[in-house]
Image (cartoon, rainbow, N blue to C red):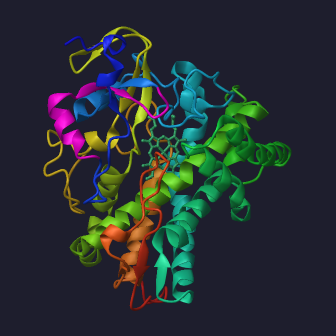
Amino acid sequence: MDQRTDVVDPQDLMDLPLPRPSECPFGPSPDFARLRVESPVVQVRCPTGMRAWLVSRYADVREVLGDAERFSSRTGQVPHMMGHADPGRPVRPGEFTRMDGAEYQRFRRHIGPEVGTPKRLAELRPRVEAIVDERIDALAAGGSRADFYGDFTVPVTTAAISGVVGVPYADRHLFHHAAAAVFSDVTSEPEMAAAMRPLHAYLYQLVRSRREDPQDDGVSRIIARSEQANEPFTEAELVSMCAVMLVAGFDTTATALAHGMFALLAYREQYARLRADPSLIPSAVEEIVRCFGGAAGIARQVTRDTEIGGTPVRAGDYVVVAIQAADRDPAEFEDPDTIDVGRRMSGHLGFGYGTHQCFGQQTARLELSVVLEKLTRRIPSLRLASAVEEVPFKENTPVIGPAAVPVTWDEILPRERGQR
Ligand code: HEM
């Protein structure tokens, strides 16, 4: 069979998204197991009408993400899922997620240190610890039942990203509202513009004030770093960059954390292992990101005629890498569908791979680690408050995960008793 996208009868194309398993809320579509063996690079029709090559094997996904010259990010991350994210629209100033090459590196150079250096992370840790303790205290004050996603992970990751960028937590509604629009596949382009306008207006003020009066915060340092290097950012670029960080930084982490804890509480022996042996927390964090990172897949565009895993693809074709499927590839991970907090592995793709690999991965790792440390100490009796199959899932979004995780507990230990 000719495998070219443009010669396949549209009737024969598979539709994305592939159905998620009804019996188990912890895995990507079971169809991926078959695809990885029979059609690892296959043509699909996306919800936005775009045709793309769906790539599901670990080695192939890594190859695509690792080669920015053959596979461009110009499309944006999720144009296959979101009608408002037309892959052909012009790249806006500061929209670095859709840039390649040197144009992109200018952004990475100046933002990267803000979220990834050991010094910055060491400064962030006590802040994140305080945020997590406060939220655990709030759970205790609220009774013996809560929604772990809405009442806990969203406030924790919101406070963390607010601190990283330098936006007061009190102003979070602006980027929550924008993120809800960005990550919804039912948002139209005009709705998107309307949702971003107040955030952009706010960030313009913030950027101007930091230019005139630098503070000890992320925006001020990014401005200073770029100016010292003689590569100053324009106001429009700074506004867009801050918006990307705020929007990309909280619900991805909140959802992965909620999904991960949902799994650890559903397979409660895993939570018990962490309580008994906190040295497993770093591997538990990686396991959560392997299983629940990566979202619904990331898009790229082929820049020149080439092959993926032996399948020819042409310049201009779209590619969607199914990260969660790749991270469940038995060729790479032993017993990949089992969540194992002690798993020894390297190289999952939950934070992506290659040039555009997640900017905030060290921040996310820090947040997940602190949450697991504090929860296992202070709420050893934490458990699900509803049956696994009753936990509702988000709809109309590529950020796959639970919409709420009802939890309960017997006792929450005060901060001082929760010390090891
Ligand atoms: C568990 C939480 C997270 C997951 C699973 C995650 C996942 C990802 C993935 C898969 C990509 C790659 C996109 C691509 O290749 O096109 C990415 C990019 C990105 N992430 Fe994250 N992320 C998380 C947390 C964060 C946080 C906390 C921040 C902010 C501090 C952040 C900021 C970004 C940004 C700015 C990009 C775009 C990078 C680029 O295009 O060069 N992420 N993330």
Please provide percent x and percent y for residue 358: 46, 41
**At 59% from the left edge and 56% from the top edge, which residue is drawn?**
161
Above or below, 2 against 12 in this view is: above
The stretch in magenta equals 29-49
Q: Which residue lies furthest to the front in this view?
A: 11
Position of 39 with respect to 70 (left or right) is left
Residue 98 among magenta residues: no
- Front residue of this view, candidates 267 and 191: 191
Q: Position of residue 74 (x, y in %)?
A: 53, 23
Whether residue 391 is situated above or below residue 194 in the rendered picture: below
In the displayed structure, would residue 94 be above or below residue 156? above
- Residue for point 28% across, 46% down: 29
Front residue of 338/189: it is 189
Is 39 magenta? The answer is: yes
Q: Can residue 170 be seen in this view?
A: yes
Name the spot of residue 32 as percent of width and height, x first.
23, 40
157, above or below 243, in the image: below
Q: Is residue 335 left or right of residue 211?
A: left
Number of numbered labels in the structure image:
0
Q: Where is residue 54 drawn, in percent x and y?
A: 32, 29
Q: In which quarter of the view is residue 262 placed?
A: bottom left
The residue lying at 33 percent from left, 37 percent from top is: 322
> In this rendering, does residue 347 appear at all?
no
| Quadrant of the drawing holding the C terminus | bottom left
- Find the residue positioned furthest to the top: 305
